[in-house]
């Protein structure tokens, strides 16, 4: 029943009576769904609908707490503050006051922390924000990284490219990172158009890696033609952004390694038209 502290995660605090309404018009998911024991996974997009950051939104009843990449926290505060205008909401980087933990494979959810199941997949376990490191951690961040790679879960800027990635390429629809009913938010038009017109040509998918792990950005080749690029990876597992036609089971080359796409059960791909 492994649990671990994730030192590369930070926390933003959004407080004030307009905190939900303020964030609601900016991010991809329904912030009002965040409550005690329930977190929401959401993304901040450019006006053109491209990924900038993603985070888990928790509520302790008095404020929203955003579990985000620690390195992105100061920039997120600055970017979100531009939209505050007359909203009765305040933002600050609270990373120094919180510790982000994860647990999986039946690890009991901790008491005395702001905690909730990971909203993406049941097999991803839970996430918790605590004011002090939780006792009893028996795994490492690397163990969690292997877990999320096996599940095919994207990891922020390691797997997505700012101002380039379209949410649905990275599984935000199937992984409950987008609300289709809550109303307008920044970047909504492209996100909706991508879904309803079936415009996706690439997907971020887990891959097995036979050989040395290719660096991020290394081209992936299928039969000599470029089919995508490598993103994150560890210990024979990885994530790669691949063209849909490369997900047919063929062997792929990437640097000095051979890749094999492992389309997870949760991922929905377009149906192939019969000949």
Image (cartoon, helix red, strand yellow):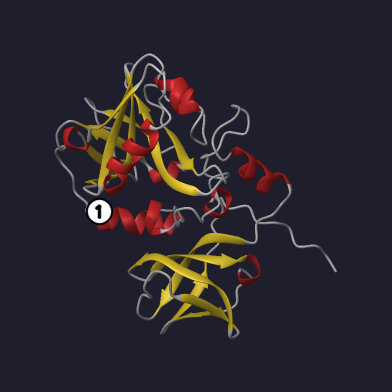
**Is residue 13 something that shows in the picture?**
yes
* Residue 208 in which image quadrant: bottom left
Secondary structure beneath dot 1 equals: helix
Residue visible at 44% across and 47% down in the picture:
52
Left or right position of 72 against 275: left
Q: Does the image show residue 108?
A: no
Q: In this view, does 134 lie to the left or right of 219?
A: left
Residue 80 x %, y %: 39, 34
Quadrant of the frame with the C terminus: bottom right
Point 22% across, 51% down: residue:
139
Q: Nearer the viewer, residue 58 or 20?
A: 20
22 over 196 or under it: above or below: above
Question: Quarter holding the N terminus?
Answer: top left
Residue 125, image x, y percentages: 37, 42
Specify the quadrant of the image occupied by residue 38: top left
Residue at the extreme top of the image, as rendered: 17
Q: Nearer the viewer, residue 225 or 75?
A: 75
Q: Is residue 134 above or below residue 275?
A: above
Mark 1, residue position: 141
Q: Which residue sits at x=51%, y=73%?
A: 260
Look at the picture and state if 108 lies above or below 260: above
Circle count: 1
Residue at 57% across / 60% down in the picture? 203
| Mark 1 neighbour density, 10 Å: few (under 14) some (14–19) many (20 or more) | some
Residue 155: percent from the left, percent from the top?
Answer: 39, 53
Residue 113 image position (x, y, % from top left): 24, 28
């Amino acid at each position: 029943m492994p649990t671990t502290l994730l030192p590369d995660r930070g926390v933003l605090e959004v407080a004030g009576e307009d905190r939900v309404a303020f964030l609601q018009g900016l991010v991809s998911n329904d912030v009002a769904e965040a409550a005690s024991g329930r977190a929401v996974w959401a993304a901040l997009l450019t006006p053109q609908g491209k990924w900038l950051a993603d985070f888990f939104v928790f509520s302790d009843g008095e404020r929203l707490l955003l579990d985000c990449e620690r390195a992105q926290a100061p920039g997120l505060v600055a970017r979100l503050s531009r939209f505050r205008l007359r909203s009765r909401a305040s933002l600050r980087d609270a990373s120094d006051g919180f510790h982000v933990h994860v647990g999986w494979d039946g690890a009991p959810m901790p008491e005395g922390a702001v905690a909730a199941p990971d909203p993406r997949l049941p097999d991803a376990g839970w996430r918790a924000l605590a004011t002090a490191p939780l006792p009893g951690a028996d795994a490492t961040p690397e163990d969690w990284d292997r877990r999320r790679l096996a599940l095919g879960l994207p990891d922020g800027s390691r797997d997505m490219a700012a101002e380039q990635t379209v949410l649905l390429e990275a599984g935000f629809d199937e992984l409950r990172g987008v609300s289709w009913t809550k109303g307008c938010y920044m970047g909504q038009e492209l996100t909706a158009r991508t879904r309803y017109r079936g415009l996706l040509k690439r997907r971020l998918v887990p891959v097995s890696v036979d050989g040395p792990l290719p660096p991020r950005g290394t081209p992936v080749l299928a039969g000599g033609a470029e089919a995508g690029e490598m993103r994150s990876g560890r210990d024979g597992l990885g994530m790669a952004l691949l063209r849909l036609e490369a997900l047919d089971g063929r062997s792929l080359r990437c640097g000095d390694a051979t890749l094999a796409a492992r389309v997870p059960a949760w991922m929905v791909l377009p149906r192939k038209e019969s000949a």
